[in-house]
Amino acid sequence: MAAIERELVEEIRKMNADQQRKVLEFARTLTNQNVDNDWESQPWTDEELQEMMTPRRKTMKEVMAWLDANPPTEEWGGMKPEDDPAEFIHNLRSQRSTVLPDPGAIE
């Protein structure tokens, strides 16, 4: 028995019969509530698993609302808030791309 349980038992023994009955009634209501709401120990149903594993596409409106609610907290790849995203990506790609010489060209 845990220390807290021993302490509770000792305190309950000090009570008169009416007080002990009230504590017992209260404990029973807690037990009934926990049985009804004990969802953490319940196994997942096949339907719940299927629903969780099925991807749901978001609408553009939902994506935009999420982006508005969760703005970036730091710069991304050196991009500043005032930069145009399309231009930034275009410049980034052109900086990192390698242009191979034409094999048929004479130098």
Image: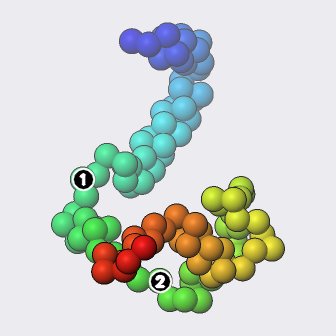
Q: Nearer the viewer, residue 48 or 82?
A: 82
Classify residue 87 by image quadrant.
Answer: bottom right
Residue 9 visible in the picture? no
**Position of the C terminus by quadrant:** bottom left
Q: Residue at x 38, y 77 (%)?
A: 106
Measuring from the top left, give residue 15's x and y in whole percent: 59, 18
Q: Nearer the viewer, residue 51 or 10?
A: 51
Mark 1, residue position: 43
Q: Report the mark closest to the observer, 1 or 2.
A: 2
Mark 2, residue position: 58
Q: Is residue 71 left or right of residue 31?
A: right
Total label count?
2
Establish if 29 lies above or below 46.
Answer: above
Classify residue 63 by image quadrant.
Answer: bottom right
Mark 1, other Cα within 10 Å: few <14 / some 14–19 / many ≥20: few
Q: Is residue 97 left or right of residue 63?
A: left
Q: Is residue 58 left or right of residue 75?
A: left
Measuring from the top left, give residue 2's x and y in whole percent: 44, 13
Q: Nearer the viewer, residue 8 or 87?
A: 87
Residue that protrudes farthest toward the right in the picture:
82
Type of amino acid at the residue the image marks with label 1: Pro
Q: Is residue 48 left or right of residue 34?
A: left
Q: Nearer the viewer, residue 26 or 107?
A: 107
User: Separation of disc 1 and disc 2 at Cα?
Assistant: 28 Å
